Image (spheres, grey):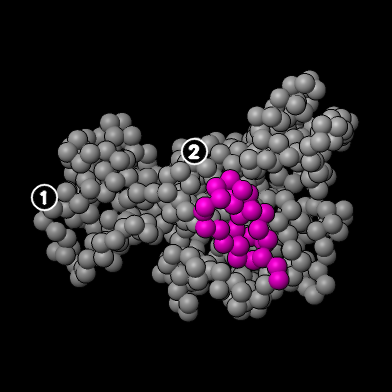
């Protein structure tokens, strides 16, 4: 089944003063997020973010960039998690896939339950510190060219320190490097009539010159405990869905040296049925990129300015699964995805284990689900076929499908300790469902 709705978590620049105040006033869950972030920030030697996000006459983006870029990063992280918490916990919306741009990938890992809110805030502090201590005199510039034409321009300049940092859209590519080299690139772009603008961030990132900082960051993050994924994350750095066996500290460290292909992520998801992209933070930077990349996808900016609570809820009400006044049944930071928008069969009423269908019918239903996910003909899927090695279904997808089957038949949510790879065939999964308690 296709992922229909993607929730996007932004990075630097996605900050609007006071934009979170209406949500914080209406929903105590926002205060819980901010409290956890503030507590972790203090432990890691950073300033709390609540005064910045909620005080009247809050500092502007330019002011924070100039005097406190570390707090700015925490504010962007906290805002995104507050948005995610409200739409999931209060309004029952569960996105099919999470996508983080650069630092936003840390937010996605928290939203998918890999890290706690506090640990995620600690990672942001460690990340900011690594860039501050090792960033040198580097900077970034956005040029109005495709990635291919930008790479050609860099080849002409032949400056070893210049690197494509991010591919944001069909005609926006960000390049990072030392200040002197970025100046030369800007001059060259202007000389050939190409629009360009400096990215307002004081430290070098997404550049091979940050290798020492990346190693230090990876070693620090490796000390923070991680849990299995409880949601689907598509990584613009890896160019694929993340898996439980991925090295998440190295993914986070890689943000300092590797390119973010956001355009590639959007096009890949859109080509496979994702038709709604939601800005999970302040402003509409990422959804603007989506519009440029696809032209057709539905985009939703939840905290665009000016905004009030009515405006936020009006935007959120366009999302699949929106409930006006009820809390979702599961925790916002550990919930598995709800059934896809094209899963049209209603859930079966279940009062106990006997509510399951007969064995043959249950096997047939599981086979149908896996056939839809893999786009393989049903008659080629055997009940004793190994789902990963023979059918190519990764463990995260298996867990998501099994959780959906459990909900359909009124079974309790699978425990976090469940090793889905221990149940390698459809027959194994059917037997597990028969032995599970009713919800």
Q: Secondary structure at mark 1?
A: helix
Residue 296: mark in rendering: none
Position of 27 with respect to 17 (left or right) is left
Residue 281: in magenta span: yes
Position of 70 with respect to 299 (left or right) is right
Looking at this view, is 284 or 332 the one in front? 284
Above or below, 91 against 66 in this view is below
Give the residue displayed 60% in from the left and 38% down from the top. Answer: 261
* Residue that mark 1 sits on: 360
Look at the image and tell me whether residue 332 can be seen. yes
Position of 250 with respect to 198 (left or right) is left
* Residue that mark 2 sits on: 240
The furthest residue to the front: 193
Give the residue displayed 60% in from the left and 42% down from the top. Answer: 262
Question: Where does the magenta region start and end?
Answer: 279-306
Tell me which label, 2 or 1, sits earlier in the chain: 2
Image coords of residue 161 (percent x, y): 78, 26
Q: CA distance from mark 2 to mark 1?
A: 35 Å
């Amino acid at each position: 089944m296709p992922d229909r709705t993607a929730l996007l978590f932004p990075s630097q620049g996605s900050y609007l003063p006071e934009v979170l105040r209406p949500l914080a006033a209406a929903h105590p869950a926002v205060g819980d997020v901010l409290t956890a972030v503030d507590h972790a920030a203090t432990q890691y030697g950073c300033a709390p973010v609540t005064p910045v996000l909620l005080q009247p006459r809050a500092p502007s983006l330019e002011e924070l960039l100039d005097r406190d870029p570390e707090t700015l990063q925490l504010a962007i992280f906290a805002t995104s998690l507050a948005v995610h918490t409200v739409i999931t916990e209060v309004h029952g919306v569960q996105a099919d896939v999470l996508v983080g741009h650069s630092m936003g990938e840390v937010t996605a890992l928290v939203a998918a339950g890999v890290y706690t809110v506090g640990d995620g805030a600690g990672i942001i502090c460690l990340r900011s510190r690594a860039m501050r201590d090792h960033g040198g005199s580097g900077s970034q510039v956005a040029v109005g060219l495709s990635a291919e034409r930008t790479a050609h321009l860099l080849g002409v300049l032949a400056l070893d320190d210049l690197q494509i940092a991010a591919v944001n859209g069909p005609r926006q590519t960000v390049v990072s490097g030392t200040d002197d080299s970025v100046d030369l690139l800007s001059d060259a772009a202007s000389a050939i009539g190409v629009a360009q603008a400096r990215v307002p961030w004081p430290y070098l990132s997404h550049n091979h010159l940050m290798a020492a900082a990346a190693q230090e960051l990876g070693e620090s993050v490796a000390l923070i405990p991680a849990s299995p994924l409880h949601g689907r994350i598509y990584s613009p750095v890896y160019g694929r869905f993340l898996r439980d066996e991925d090295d998440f500290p190295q993914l986070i460290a890689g943000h300092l040296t590797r390119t973010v292909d956001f355009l590639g992520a959007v096009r890949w998801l859109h080509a496979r049925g994702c038709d709604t992209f939601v800005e999970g933070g302040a402003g509409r930077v990422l959804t603007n990129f989506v519009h440029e990349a696809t032209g057709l996808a539905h985009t939703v900016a939840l905290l665009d300015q000016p905004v009030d609570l009515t405006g936020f809820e009006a935007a959120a009400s366009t999302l699949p699964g929106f409930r006006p006044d009820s809390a979702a049944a599961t925790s916002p930071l550990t919930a598995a995805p709800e059934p896809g928008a094209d899963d049209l069969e209603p859930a079966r009423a279940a009062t106990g284990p006997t509510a399951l269908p007969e064995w043959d019918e249950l096997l047939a239903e599981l086979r149908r689900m896996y056939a839809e996910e893999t786009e393989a003909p049903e008659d080629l899927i055997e009940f004793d076929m190994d789902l990963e090695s023979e059918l190519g279904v990764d463990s995260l997808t298996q867990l998501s499908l099994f959780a959906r089957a459990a909900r359909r038949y009124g079974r309790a949510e699978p425990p976090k300790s469940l090793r889905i790879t221990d149940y390698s065939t459809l027959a194994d999964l059917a037997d597990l469902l028969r032995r599970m308690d009713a919800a």
